[in-house]
Amino acid sequence: MEIVKIPLIIERGEGKVLWGRVEYNGNLITDFANSIPELEEKIKILLFDFEELNPDNIQFEHQFDIYSLFQRFDFLKISTVAEHAGMNPGLLRQYVSGAKNPSEEQAKKIERTLHKLAQELQKASIFTS
């Protein structure tokens, strides 16, 4: 069977709840959960119920808001990411907490910084002596 790649938009709901949404065949499918794996599972069940898609053949392409991104990659230090992005760490913390929302320009700046850091990590190698 062919893998179906579907964009899954993940964003903060009330409290620490995550909301997810996909659009498939013109239908908007949404649900919420406490974690990304739980959210993926629930959305896959809905895609099976409404669209008869085999859950084993679904691959999600994640699109995060700032809060859900830092929840998913909880090993990232907000202050370090902010420093690499040339922004105030307090401002990035406000974005992550949901107290403020970044502009599209600020969001792209954070995204570019994360991609640059990921490229640097890919080049890193570890050796033993």
Image: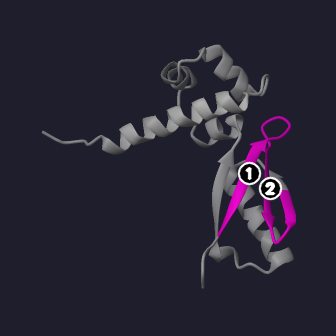
Q: Residue furthest bottom?
A: 1
33 is higher (above) or lower (below) than 126? below
List the residue tagged with mark 2. 21
Q: Amino acid at mark 2?
A: Arg
Q: Residue at x 83, y 40 (%)?
A: 13
Provide residue 7's location: percent of width, then percent of height.
69, 59
Q: Would you say residue 36 is visible in this rendering?
A: yes
Q: Is residue 24 magenta?
A: yes
User: CA separation, marks 1 and 2?
Assistant: 5 Å
Q: Residue at x 31, y 42 (%)?
A: 123
Q: Which residues are magenta?
A: 5-30
> Residue 108 lies in what quarter of the image?
top right
Helix, strand or loop for disc 2: strand
Q: Is residue 8 magenta?
A: yes
Provide residue 47's location: percent of width, then percent of height.
79, 71
Query: Quick check: 83 left or right of 55?
Result: left
Q: Residue at x 82, y 72 (%)?
A: 25
Label 1 with label 2: CB-CB less than 8 Å: yes
Badge number at residue 9:
1
Mark 2 residue crowding within 10 angstroms, few (<14) / some (14–19) / many (20+): some
Q: Residue furthest front?
A: 105
Provide residue 82's location: percent of width, then percent of height.
55, 22
Query: Quick check: 4 left or right of 47?
Result: left
Quarter of the picture containing the N terminus is bottom right
Residue 41 vs residue 58, the one in the foreground: 58
Q: Amino acid at mark 1?
A: Ile
